[in-house]
Amino acid sequence: MSTVSAPRPFDHPALFYRDEQEYLAGTVPFVRDGLAAGDPVAVAVPGANLALIRAELGEQAREVRLLDMTRAGRNPGRIIPRVLRAFADSHPRRRPRIIGEPIWAGRTEAEYPACAQHEALINLAFQGREATILCPYDATRLAESVLADAHVTHPTIIRSGAQADSTAYAPEALVARYNQPLKAPAGVMATAYTGATLAAVRQHATRWAADLGLPGSRLDDFELAVAELTTNSVVHAGGQGALRIWAQNQHVICEVHDAGLLDDPLAGRRLPAGDQRGGRGLLLVNVVADLVRVHSASDQGTTTHVYFRC
């Protein structure tokens, strides 16, 4: 028998839906109840689902912050700071309601681990903050393994209108499970760097990316990401590192490896305080890149893969 969970200071349910009717039945009342209560409401879902919600809300859609998640959340590492916390923090002392759908059919194999970690890290990012974030999952098009992970990352599951506690909830374990080793393709040579060679390596990397087909409109962002990651190696990870660049599946990918350990799970996803010096490097990388994957272990150092679509 299903049981209805008591409200939590921060609530993070997953909504399993099988068709448009179940999708609208699970999302639109959530939005309307929030508006009726005077809560700020945002909806960040893929474009087709956004159109469904907008049409169903009618004139009320004007009262809601609407975002196409395929754009705003192309890189899962960008969603917490630039979508969820950005909206919540713009309404201090109020309880925001947000619908966030970061996982959809068509997400690539490379993207999915970052998506799953994102869903797990929402719980840490909103710890102590009153808010409700509802995450829809397409139960007919997503793999069973993805739905199983949703039970691990969400304390409650809504299915066919009934809400029940998840017995598999263990978000920290999932973050660790998807802390997977990252490797460059065979034959991709590494370029070593130190503090003395940072500028030269950054310029070399940008020319390399251009030769691999990255358009000029993205080269500045690529150079910024390389600069932030290599500078972090020099300042925080022993003063040196190694860089690799290659093209794969319509992306230019940059790998930065160093001996440091990244032990803050929200690194690059936490908005620094306004008066804080530093702490924005990894956040900037998440903002400009199309995907960021990180593996960090005490005996292996930290490897970061940054993807830019050609």
Image: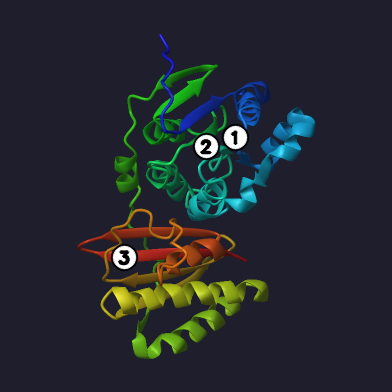
Q: Answer with the quarter of the image where residue 12 lies.
A: top left
The spot of residue 44 in percent (x, y) is 61, 42
Q: Position of residue 165 (x, y in %)?
A: 38, 22
Q: Amino acid at mark 2?
A: Arg
Depicted 31 relative to depicted 251: above or below: above
**Label 2 residue SS:** loop
Pointer 1: what residue?
39
| Three-letter amino acid code at the position of disc 3 | Thr
Indicate the position of residue 122 as horizontal and vertical percent values: 43, 43
The residue at the point 64 percent across, 52 percent down is 71
Q: Are marks 3 and 2 in contact (CB under 8 Å)?
A: no
Q: Amino acid at mark 1?
A: Asp
Q: Nearer the viewer, residue 116 or 286?
A: 286
Residue 159 vertical position relative to residue 91 in the rendered view, above or below: above
The residues bearing labels 3 and 2 have C-alpha atoms spaced at a distance of 37 Å
Q: Nearer the viewer, residue 209 or 69?
A: 69
The Cα atoms of the two marked residues, 3 and 1, are separated by: 41 Å
Residue 2 spot, x, y in % from top left = 42, 12
Evaluate whether residue 32 shows in this view. yes
Asked which secondary structure carries label 1, the reply is loop
State how far apart marks 2 and 1 are (Cα). 6 Å
- Classify 10 Å Cα crowding around label 1: few (below 14), some (14-19), many (20 and above): some
Find disc 2 in the rendering and name its residue: 95
- Name the mark on residue 288: none
- Label 3: state its secondary structure: strand
Q: Residue furthest left?
A: 299
Q: Which residue is mark 3?
A: 302
